Image (tube, grey):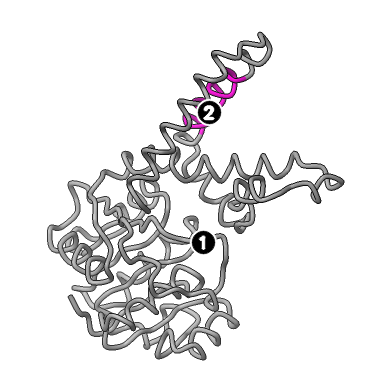
Amino acid sequence: MKCDTLVIVGVGLLGGSLARAVRQRDVARRLVGIDRAESHRRRAVELGLVDQAVADLADEAAAGADMVVACTPVDCIAAPLIEAARRCRPDALLTDVGSTKAGIVRAVEDALPPDRLFVGGHPLAGSEKCGPEHADGGLFDGRLVILTPTPRTRPEALERATGFWQALGARVRIMTPEEHDRAVALTSHLPHVVASALAAVLPGSLCELAASGFRDTTRLASSDPRLWTAICSHNREFLLEALELFEGKLEEFRRALSRDDAARLFELLEEGKRARGGLASRGP
């Protein structure tokens, strides 16, 4: 799949990486970046990620887009897609990379005419880093992208979005928005909360003793707090379910330790080892 003009709303890490991947694989003839941050716009052009960068979709630079991808924080995704529907070509494909889906998809679908082409998306790729200077053209290569159609999604939208991500080297899986949000609450959002909590309990006086195990386990705590506040809030219901499961497992460890039950402690650690081994065998 190749499009003529691709508009990327938000040219930070994900948007910049998307632009670089599109460049490397020649998936679009022209790239336009939309970002309110002047520093992001300037760097995106300097780095050759986009041909042009403007502050908002009202600029005529975005008017001829045949595809718009929103790469902003999840609490800022619906609005630009709704605006894009008013500014861009009637047959433009609208999609996003947000890591929550149910709320975004509902807001966009409720605002768009039924003939507009929209499907929610989420590439399972990223980094704790931010900004276009960290853009990685290989970020999506071999990665899984979740597309979340609903009964209101037009088949052409799903087909074009699938072709787009596959052209960037990604694998595509279809889920409902709710299935997606429940799954990523466990696989993505819970690990961020746990990493942040673990990092926060370390007294400053012990930082020198925190070796690679602690640093690796808490790497996600380096992520942008504003971004993750929005993600956690948007997926509040399913994240609370995930936290309850995690708290239950921690309680099993607590009971085994309080009873000095080495056999049970071994079982719990062995269970974790097996699960981690199965995860590693599946690759990234």
The image shows residue 266 at horizontal and vertical percentages of: 54, 20
Q: Say which quarter of the image contains residue 2.
A: bottom left
262 inside magenta stretch: no
Q: Position of residue 113 (x, y in %)?
A: 23, 60
Vertical relation: 150 (above or below) 84: above
Count of marks placed on residues: 2
Quarter of the image holding residue 92? Answer: bottom left
The kind of residue on which mark 1 rests is: Ser
Q: Marks 2 and 1, how far apart in space?
A: 23 Å
Disc 1 secondary structure class: loop
> In percent of the image, x 34 and y 72: which residue is there?
84
Residue 246 bears which disc, if any? 2
Q: In this view, which residue lies farthest toward the top? A: 259
Residue sticking out furthest to the left: 155
Q: Is the magenta stretch mostly helix, strand or loop?
A: helix
Residue at the spot 17% in from the left edge and 75% down from the top edge: 1
What is the quadrant of the C terminus in the image? bottom left
The residue at the point 63 percent across, 54 percent down is: 225
Question: In the image, residue 16 lies at what x, y percent?
Answer: 45, 75
Q: Nearer the viewer, residue 24 or 216?
A: 216
Q: Is residue 245 magenta?
A: yes
**Disc 2 or 1, which lies upstream in sequence?**
1
Name the residue type under label 2: Phe
**Given contact means CB atoms under 8 Å apart, are the residues at marks 2 and 1 in contact?**
no
Q: Is residue 44 above or below residue 158?
A: below
The one of 264 and 244 positioned closer to us in this rendering: 264
Determine which of the numbered discs, if any, sits on residue 127 in the image.
1
Front residue of this view, candidates 207 and 262: 262
Read off the magenta span: 240-253
Q: Residues within 10 Å of mark 1 (few under 14, many from 20)?
A: some
Is residue 207 left or right of 48 when viewed as pictured?
right
Crowding at dot 2, Cα within 10 Å, few <14 / some 14-19 / many 20+, comes out as some
